[in-house]
Image (cartoon, rainbow, N blue to C red):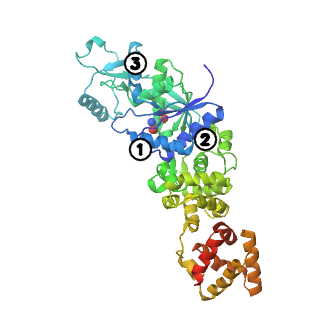
Amino acid sequence: MSDKVVTRFAPSPTGYLHIGGARTALFNWLYAKHTGGTMLLRIEDTDRERSTEAATAAILDGLTWLGLSWDGEAVSQFERAPRHREVAEELVRLGKAYYSYETPAELEAMREAARAKGLPPRYNGQWRDRDPSEAPPGLKGAIRIKAPTEGETVVHDRVQGEVRFPNKDLDDFIILRSDGNPTYMHAVVVDDHDMGVTHIIRGDDHLTNAARQTVIYNAMGWDVPSMSHIPLIHGADGAKLSKRHGALGVEAYRSMGYLPEALLNYLARLGWSHGDDEVMSIKDMIGWFDIGDVNKGAARFDFAKLEALNGVHMRKMDDHALFDIFVATLPYLEGGPALAARLDDQKKAQLLAALPGLKERAKTLVELVDGAGFLFAERPLPVDEKAAALLSGEARAVLRGAHATLTAVSGDWTAATAEAAIRDFAQAGGHKLGAVAQPLRAALTGRSTSPGVFDVLAVLGREESLARIADQID
Ligand code: GLU
């Protein structure tokens, strides 16, 4: 056996890839990348009633958007049912499991009786030691594992530490139902073993399952993988994560204009840290991540922090890379499709040229759509209220002068030539620079805030700039 690390992400396709699932996938992916191992993907679609194709597609799409790639084909758990059955029957042959024949009503009565005695409602093991020849004829029976009755089952968890479960609390749980279908508990163990998974990293809501699954591993004589149960994400107020807190599918984060890299950075830092480093590239995370460093305490999700971090990533990002992500994300962003529809080559060039100024003022790609709006606006521009206030009678007179000055600019039309002309004009007329720049900005963008006004002039070009200014002085 090689020492290569094999992790897996094993979502149940009953809904979108939510933010907690994305973090579990990220930790599996980072650990695999950090150790030079692989991450596998298994779709836990054994529950036929709740699993849907659409959910599977949404999960794959979410992982792909985040760049959390898996190795090989995704495995369908449901398709492996014959193998789950085979192992369950093998356990019966080995004397480690047995058939039991209670009807649902009998099981309910058993639980009632236990409750009446103040005991936990557990299976009483009545078929455990009976001879199979006593089985009621014609009935198939469910297969139950013979759980140990004394001592304890210990889960050696790299996040939670050593977690001990008294065996008297574990009953002989079902591994194969009487209809021949495996239980979730059993399927996970058989799949993880067959897929060669060396490290299980998942939410700590699965910690008690780890004890039961250990019983199955031991019964088969299989090695128990390394276990890491990571704390769930809570809201900023410490309560369980709800929609309001950000318990949304990752596609909602795409629509809100977060960059995959920023979201991954934020999720990685939820419950894990590397010194004081807040801003990390994917490469940094891969280099620094170790599952053993994840905290035991619940992590708190905070939108304000995510947004601030996203702004930092946007400003740091190379303009061409940001441009590509922005254009690819446009269809999902509020106001994005309208922009995408008008993104011809000229607009693309303008957008790229304006990006350095635009990204200084945006924390998300949605804010970038908003900021870039002036590039796409049609004359005469709609002017918002604050901008209208900058276009008072006096300001219009200044604007008229600025228009004449800019019209006279000969040679190249650049931010530098425009700036030189406007500065000369302001000085000659005894105006403060702002008294010229503000109405100019309002006329050029219809807004009171924008990238630097000289950059705006350069990006829009001579003809469009002069026309927009003229629209406000006539
Ligand atoms: N399918 C389970 C879930 O979505 C995960 C099981 C596991 O990781 O072992 O929560």
Asked if residue 6 shows in the view, the reply is yes
| Residue at 63% in and 76% down | 466
Q: Position of residue 236 (x, y in %)?
A: 53, 55
| Disc sitting over residue 86 in the figure | 3
Q: Who is closer to the viewer here, 144 or 26? A: 26
Q: Is residue 365 above or below residue 164?
A: below
Q: Is residue 303 above or below residue 117?
A: below
The three-letter code of the residue at mark 3 reads: Glu
Marks 3 and 1 sit apart, C-alpha to C-alpha, by: 30 Å
Question: Does label 3 or label 2 sit earlier along the sequence?
Answer: 3
Considering only order in the chain, which callout, 1 or 3, is on the residue closer to the N terminus? 1
- Please rate how many residues cluster around mark 3, counting C-alpha atoms within 10 Å: few if below 14, some from 14 to 19, many from 20: few
Image quarter of the C terminus: bottom right
Q: Which residue is mark 1?
A: 15
Image quadrant containing the N terminus: top right
Q: Is residue 9 above or below residue 420?
A: above
Please give the residue where the numbered disc 2 appears in the rendered image.
Answer: 294
Marks 1 and 2, how far apart in space?
A: 26 Å
Instruction: Verify CB contact (< 8 Å) between mark 1 and mark 2.
Output: no
Mark 3 or mark 2, whichever is nearer to me: 3
Query: Which amino acid does the dot numbered 2 rest on?
Result: Val
Residue 80 position within the rendered picture, expressed as x and y whole percent measured from the top left:
41, 25
Residue drawn where x is 74% and y is 82% of the image: 425
